[in-house]
Amino acid sequence: MNLYDSRSGSVLYAMNINSVSDEHSPLWEDRIRALPPDRVKKITAYRFLDDRKRSLSALVLLEAALGRDVLFHIAEGEHGKPYIKDGPCFNISHSGEWVLLLVSEKPVGVDIERHKTRHNFREIARRAFHAVEYEELLAAPDQAKRFFDLWALKESYLKRLGCGLFTDSSSFRVLLNGSSALIETDPSAVLRL
């Protein structure tokens, strides 16, 4: 699946990891053999099969979106954000059975979160959200939905900047407006749910 956003010129790709063949199949082995050695090392270092599938799925999406050669030119920024020198901007996220890839000509960030019902989100929000966001969360009719929406928006923004969770996520405020949002201190950042 992919989704083109004409407002931003971004394309969103999604893949369910269950569409990746079993790691003992000839298809898996052929796929792994075709990858650069550093990518194979990264995939095989994961302890759990689903983590290996998420990692491989991200590369499958990158190849589908940008071509096989791109897999040999992935570098990492100071805080680990992958990029392609002189190439389009992209960002990857995964959670549960899904992997997302967002591709654009401008810096982008994407996040997907699986809603965990036994998640102690209020305590995390108290520490990770701006004070006003936390108060808005406590007043929301569906606190869990509000938490996961804000968390994904905040993480997407930090990933766009290339700093990930190395920046204090409580230091800025997300202003929600339906299915879109802005960052209070960075009006150039436009976010979408």
Image (cartoon, grey):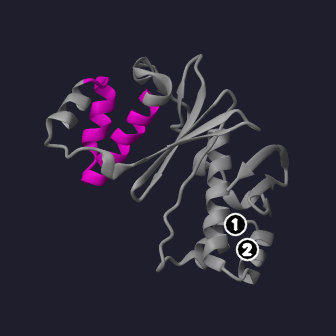
As drawn, 160 above or below 32: below
Residue 48 shows which numbered tag? Answer: none
Q: Which residue carries the number 1 mark?
A: 129
The answer to whether any part of residue 32 appears in the image is: yes
Q: The disc labelled 2 sits on which kind of residue?
A: Tyr
As for residue 123 lying within the magenta part, the answer is no
Nearer to the camera, 127 or 176 = 176
Q: Which residue carries the number 2 mark?
A: 134
Q: Earlier in the sequence, mark 2 or mark 1?
A: 1
Residue 8 relative to residue 84: left or right: right
Residue at horizontal 66 percent and vertical 80 percent from the top? 142
Q: CA distance from mark 2 to mark 1?
A: 6 Å
Q: Quadrant of residue 180?
A: bottom right
Residue at horizontal 66 percent and vertical 35 percent from the top? 10
Residue 170 relative to residue 166: left or right: right
The quarter of the picture where the C terminus appears is bottom right
> SS for tag 2?
helix
As drawn, 191 above or below 59: below
Q: Position of residue 148 (x, y in %)?
A: 60, 67
As for residue 53 lying within the magenta part, the answer is yes
